[in-house]
Amino acid sequence: MPRRRRRDEWERPERMTPKPRVDSHAFRDEGHRLLHTLRLSEVMKARDNPFSTDRVLRVRYKLCDITWPQLLARLERLNYRAAIVGPHGSGKTTLLEDLEPRLIESRLPIKRLRLDDEHPSLDRAAARELNGALRSRDVILFDGAEQLGWYAWHRFVAKTRRAGGWIITQHRPGRLPTLVECRTSPKLLLGIVSELFPDGSQTLGLQLPELYLRHGGICATRYVNYTTGLLS
């Protein structure tokens, strides 16, 4: 007879893809080498840094192998119940943010939820407020759904079943049909750096593939943020 799962097991979040670990000392040395190569510290002030946080945040998600009309048509076929899937740092949150105004243009009211490592569970008061105000056309954009355990996820689905849809982000497929799988690549990283710093893209182009392979898909975020810190 199969063992019944205890309630505390139901509450555990699904097993998530571990965040890549980076050697901070090696990363610091690479940052200094990059600055020396680009000579950024000699030619600009921190406020002019092309990799500053506000400029990085202006870079939006780059769709691959699909257009926005195609993605929205697929989402409609899935009855607005779908998942944006990908590892940590692959752009899931950015894509979810970019999807919101397009849904609003389609006259779909939006409700937002977000969980992360610091806030891994739904606040009961906020959940009651959401459930009480939920309407049949509302689409819930749920960033970080992988934080919910099996029991908590199914409880969330039951409580919000009258919603017009759920679009969630998670690290692995399974809970809802996959709308799009977010991936990173050296080519994508080069495109982002070229957009931020066109004058240095040719110099960086030879280094980025090696950095990408060494640090994984989060190379752009960590490397850019560290470079920003050196210049501030």
Image (cartoon, rainbow, N blue to C red):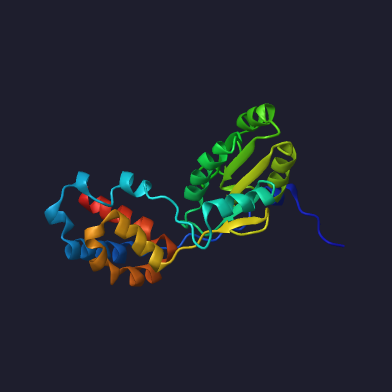
Determine the residue positioned at 15% across, 60% down: 39
The quadrant holding residue 112 is: top right
Is residue 173 toward the left or the right of residue 45 in the image? right
Count of number-bearing discs: 0
Determine the residue positioned at 30% across, 59% down: 194
Residue 30 x, y percent position in the rendering: 26, 65
Q: Quadrant of the N terminus?
A: bottom right
Is residue 212 toward the left or the right of residue 150 in the image? left
Outermost residue, left direction? 42
138 vs 133, nearest the viewer: 138
151 vs 67, nearest the viewer: 67
Q: Could you tell me if residue 82 is visible in this image?
A: yes
Residue 74 x, y percent position in the rendering: 63, 53
Residue 149 x, y percent position in the rendering: 66, 49
Determine the residue positioned at 57% across, 53% down: 71
Residue 161 x, y percent position in the rendering: 74, 39
Is residue 218 toward the left or the right of residue 145 in the image? left
Determine the residue positioned at 17% across, 56% down: 40
Outermost residue, right direction? 1
170 vs 192, nearest the viewer: 192
Q: Could you tell me if residue 12 is visible in this image?
A: no
